[in-house]
Image (spheres, grey):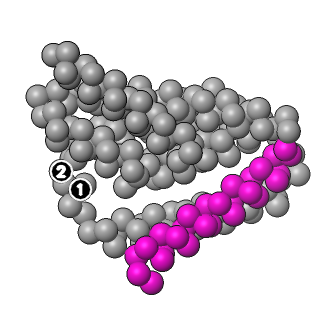
Amino acid sequence: MTTVWAQMGIMFSSLFLVELPDKTSLAAITLAARGRALEVWLGASAALIVQTAVAVAFGRVLAYLPVLWVHVGEALLFIGFAVWVWRASAENETLGARSQQPGRTAGRAFLVVLAAEFGDLTQFATAGWAARFPTHVLLVGVVAAIALVTASALSVTAGQWLLRVISARWLQRAAALIFLGVGVASVMQAGF
């Protein structure tokens, strides 16, 4: 059992570190710039837990999806998200103002992170760990979810800190350009 716990420590560390500079964290930072941090974190965490469950339950199936489909889907999601974020920054003069509708921010964070995490490196890694430890899939799922939720908390906190240094409008526009870049890179990886 010691070997399994050591492997779970390695899995936690690797997933946490990979998630920090990930597109999902960027989405959480962007959403935290517009909404209540706790709601963003709760929505993002729920999405990460759902995606972890998907990765554990269907790990082997996800690994066999055609790479082209993953890249095209990712490209469409991120180009669409880039347009949405850019338009929101242009339409709303008070981007730093917090949403007054409880639950809406959490729902938006859930949907954005759920979409962003599909086919993500951390999801494939979690599926790989589940395949490696088939008798400990519940443990794999719990450790992976804790790693991702912890990274999300750090991202949301970073988003709130960035608001003190950079205006919300420019933070969102920078995020939109990065999302556009991820979308274009996905198109290029798909061979288009």
| Residue 26 place in picture, x, y as percent | 61, 47
| Residue 7 place in picture, x, y as percent | 26, 27
Q: Which residues are magenta?
A: 166-192
Quarter holding residue 91:
bottom right
User: Is 52 placed above or below 169 here?
Assistant: above
Q: CB of mark 2 within 8 Å of CB of mark 1?
A: yes
| Residue 147 place in picture, x, y as percent | 43, 29
Q: Is residue 10 visible?
A: yes
Secondary structure beneath dot 2 equals helix
Secondary structure beneath dot 1 equals helix
In the picture, the disc for residue 60 is 2
Q: Quadrant of the N terminus?
A: top left
Q: Amino acid at mark 2?
A: Arg
Q: Quadrant of the C terminus?
A: bottom left
In the image, taking residue 126 as reference, residue 85 lies left or right, namely right
| Residue density around tag 2, few if under 14, some if 14–19, many if 20 or more, within 10 Å | some
Q: Main secondary structure of the magenta part?
A: helix
| Residue density around tag 1, few if under 14, some if 14–19, many if 20 or more, within 10 Å | some
Residue under label 1, please give it: 63
- Seen at 19% across and 21% down, the residue is 3
| Magenta stretch contains residue 156 | no
In the image, taking residue 60 as reference, residue 86 lies left or right, namely right
The one of 35 and 78 positioned closer to us in this rendering = 78
| Magenta stretch contains residue 183 | yes
